[in-house]
Amino acid sequence: MNAKRSRPRDPAGGAARPRMAARRAVFAALVLATMAGLAGALALVLSEGGLAALEIVLVALFALNTPWLCIGFWNAVIGVALPRLRRDWLAAALPLRGLGEDESPVASRVAIVMPVRNEDAGRAVGRLRAAADSLDAAGHGGAFAFFLLSDTDRPAVAAAEERLFARWRAADPRPDRLHYRRRARNTGLKAGNIADFCDRWGGRFDHMVVLDADSAMTGAAILRIVRLMEANPRLGILQTLVTGLPSAAAFARVFQFGMRHGMRAYTLGSAWWQGDHGPYWGHNAIVRLAPFRAHCRLPRLPGAPPLGGDVLSHDQVEAALMRGAGWEVRVLPVEGGSFEDNPPTLQDYLKRDLRWCQGNMQYLRLLAMPGVLAMGRLQLLLAILMYASAPVWYAFMATGLAYFAFAVDDARGFAPTGPGVALFAIVLALGFAPKILGVLDLLSRPAERRRYGGGRAAAAGALVEAAFSMLLAPVAALAQTVLIAGLFLGRRIAWDGQRRDPRRVSWREAAGALWPQTLAGIGLAGALAALAPGFLPWAAPVVLGLSLAIPFAVATARPGAGRALARSGCCAIPEEIDPPAELRRLGLGAAATPPAPEEGRPEAPGSRRGAARA
């Protein structure tokens, strides 16, 4: 396709550029001022008698760790304040035509695509079929075609995909709209899977809605984003705000409760200043196919994996290329009908997180990629910082121990003073600000409190989630640190199907995965006790999180823990209390339980057969 012909013709929107430039300048000033204030405060705390070399290193490492912290804080502040300051808050963050109620027929040709690789066939086909049923019920199913794009290389899983899809086709009144394709080779990974779809079928459709194997979208949510694409011819990608599904697993239940409130405020705030340079998360989004085919073909990175080769975290690169070609990339910062599963255990969460970490680190080789605007490069840099802050954080703590050992005459009597305590509290508050502000916003609105089972239940859930996050953060950060160090030594992790169903975690499995965190926690506690015991209370969140990683993993995977939370209503979300019809049909409403075992489900790597295969 000719790239010039695929550029947007509508010149509207130029008048908004000065306004967006002003917003970005204000946001940058707020973030930079906060970063400078934090670094200056630490320098002041350490400056008695002047700053020695180790103290300068401490301030520098602390400063390097503040960008992601400050960006998250100001995104959340803006996201909570905007609806309270402006009646047209959604239009202010998302200036698109057609934001109101719209029942017009779908005029474009839309493909709903789900790329899968060694996933639970029942889940994948069921979720895709649920989207089709919901669109049929709304009377618009005829405008859509559905594609299960398989890269599965496990024979049993592939056979289950084929069998279940054939069963769907046999029962569907319009089977010609249902397509199953399986590639013999996983060339280009997920991005290559989508590229193959674009090459073979992309010319037949105007838009594609991309789903993951664990995605669930209601027909109303899909119709809304399709109509917004039709009403806004400059729009290249529109990402929905994805929320977690109800889960019987305690880990997933608490995790998605916190993510729900943090992401709601964070996404609205970021949409306000990012504007048409918004994010793309690779699923639960709609893409205009002509410019995507023309401009978003990914390069193969120089060098060998893990940092070279195929681009793993393809989504944000595609967004940067789309915007660089003149098309808008935006996020719809409101909840409604767009869902995903969250990992059921700590180990599954870390596996997914480290996959993203590995992919984001490849962006180091893409920052100078041609065809990307300055905001696109900033998005790639922010994606790097999301994970690079972890090794910086641990480097800061290691330098702090060296400081106590070599630069303080009587470190055993050394303890934080008033300014140091205040700085600690400020940093902690900044880190938790998106979730804190999101929960406060929920509690301040009676209708929202009722959707979450009442103010007491929501407040109790917030307290449970805060303790959960404090234990989780240092565990995840250490895993990221070890992975990033390994990436530069050529080590990598595999990208394959994920475990998404609730399951038990044995003490042996937890110890085998989390012994580095446990040793690090015990070692940090011992070092502080020997060098500066006065700092032990202030290091407690990190020490406890690392030291208790194994029992934390076991406890949050126990079925009884999930049942107890569900009975009490703690960490409940609206879809558990009043599930949409689409989720009820999938068995994903209140008291959600895992699907029945089925031939073709990927084996858990922790099982005997899965361990042998790994």
Image (cartoon, rainbow, N blue to C red):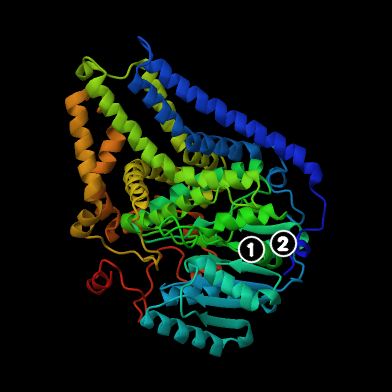
Horizontal and vertical percent position of residue 323: 67, 53
Q: Earlier in the sequence, mark 2 or mark 1?
A: 2
Q: Please name whichever residue, 501 or 326, is drawn nearer the observer in this view of the structure.
A: 326
Q: Which residue appears at 28% of the width and 33% of the height?
A: 540
Counting labels gives: 2
Q: Which residue is mark 2?
A: 229
Horizontal and vertical percent position of residue 290: 71, 67
Picture layout, residue 88 above or below residue 209: above
Asked if the residues shown at circle 2 and circle 1 are in contact, with their CB atoms under 8 angstroms apart, the answer is yes
* Quadrant for the N terminus in the image: bottom right
Q: Please name whichever residue, 547 or 377, is drawn nearer the observer in this view of the structure.
A: 377
Q: Which residue appears at 20% of the width and 54% of the height?
A: 511
Q: Please name whichever residue, 610 or 366, is drawn nearer the observer in this view of the structure.
A: 366
Say which amino acid is labelled 1: Ile
Q: Which residue appears at 52% of the width and 49% of the height?
A: 450
Q: Please name whichever residue, 588 or 53, is drawn nearer the observer in this view of the structure.
A: 53
Say which amino acid is labelled 2: Met
Q: Which residue is mark 1?
A: 286
Work out how far the residue at label 2 is from the one at label 1, CA to CA, in angstroms: 8 Å
| Crowding near the residue tagged with mark 2, few <14, some 14–19, many ≥20 C-alpha atoms within 10 Å | many
